[in-house]
Structures are given as structure tokens and as C-alpha cells.
Image: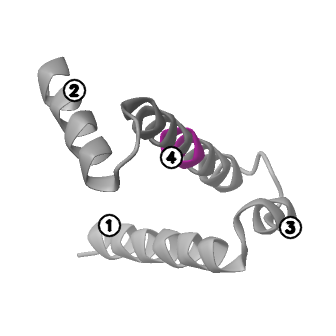
Amino acid sequence: MGTDGVSDHVHELAAHHDIDESAVIQRAVETGVETLYRNMLVRKYLADEITREEAVDQLGIEVIEEVESARAAVEEDVEWGLHA
């Protein structure tokens, strides 16, 4: 999507929510930074750069359990693939 598309989306969101375009951009930046930060913490946990306790404190037990479940599923798939 080019800058024209982004600009159109910002304008449409602002009109829909009856807020300034600058508020839309601020929300987008905040949401993006939160997503990037969460992803960084997940990667650090998976790389053993932070403890499980630290990850739970930052992300919550639900997120960590989901990450652990996904990791276990991938490990099972890899193991199956190696022995298929």
C-alpha cells in the first residue's frame, strides 16, 4: 500500500470515529509500538533471554501458555517430519 492508500485510510478512520487525523496516527503508532514490543518479549522468552516469570509478568500467563503451546506443536511437527 502506498502513501496515498495510508492517507486515505487515515482520513476515512478519522471521519468514521469523528476524531482528528493526528489522533488516528497517534493511535496507530501506539498500537504498532505495543505490538512490536510484545513480539520482542516473546522472541526474548523463546531465546531464553528472559525467564518465564519475567515473560509472565510482562505479557500475562495466557500469552505465555499460548506461546508454549505453539512452540510444542512446532517441535512435534519437526520431530514427526524427521521420522516420517
Compare marks 1 and 2 and give the one earlier in the sequence.
2
Query: Viewer-proximal residue, 50 or 77?
Result: 50
Q: Which residues are magenta?
A: 31-36
Task: Measure how far apart labels 4 and 2 are at the Cα level.
Answer: 17 Å
Whether residue 2 is visible here, answered yes or no, is no
**Above or below, 82 relative to 39:** below
Q: Which residue is mark 3?
A: 53
Mark 1 is surrounded, within 10 Å at the Cα level, by few (under 14), some (14 to 19) or many (20 or more) other residues, namely: few
Looking at the rendered image, the disc whose residue lies closer to the viewer, 3 or 2, is 2
Side (left or right) of 11 relative to 69:
left
Please, what is the dominant secondary structure of the magenta stretch? helix
Residue 32 painted magenta: yes
Task: Measure how far apart labels 1 and 3 are at the Cα level.
Answer: 32 Å
Quarter holding the C terminus is bottom left
Percent position of residue 40, x then y = 61, 43
Q: Which residue is mark 1?
A: 82
Q: Which residue is mark 2?
A: 7
Question: Label 3 sits on what residue type?
Answer: Glu
Mark 3 is surrounded, within 10 Å at the Cα level, by few (under 14), some (14 to 19) or many (20 or more) other residues, namely: few
| Residue at 83% across, 65% down | 57
Question: Label 4 sits on what residue type?
Answer: Thr
Question: Label 1 sits on what residue type?
Answer: Leu
Percent position of residue 30, x then y = 56, 41
Compare marks 3 and 2 and give the one earlier in the sequence.
2
Residue furthest top as drawn: 3
**Above or below, 41 relative to 23:** below
Residue furthest front as drawn: 18
Compare marks 4 and 2 and give the one earlier in the sequence.
2
Q: Secondary structure at mark 4?
A: helix
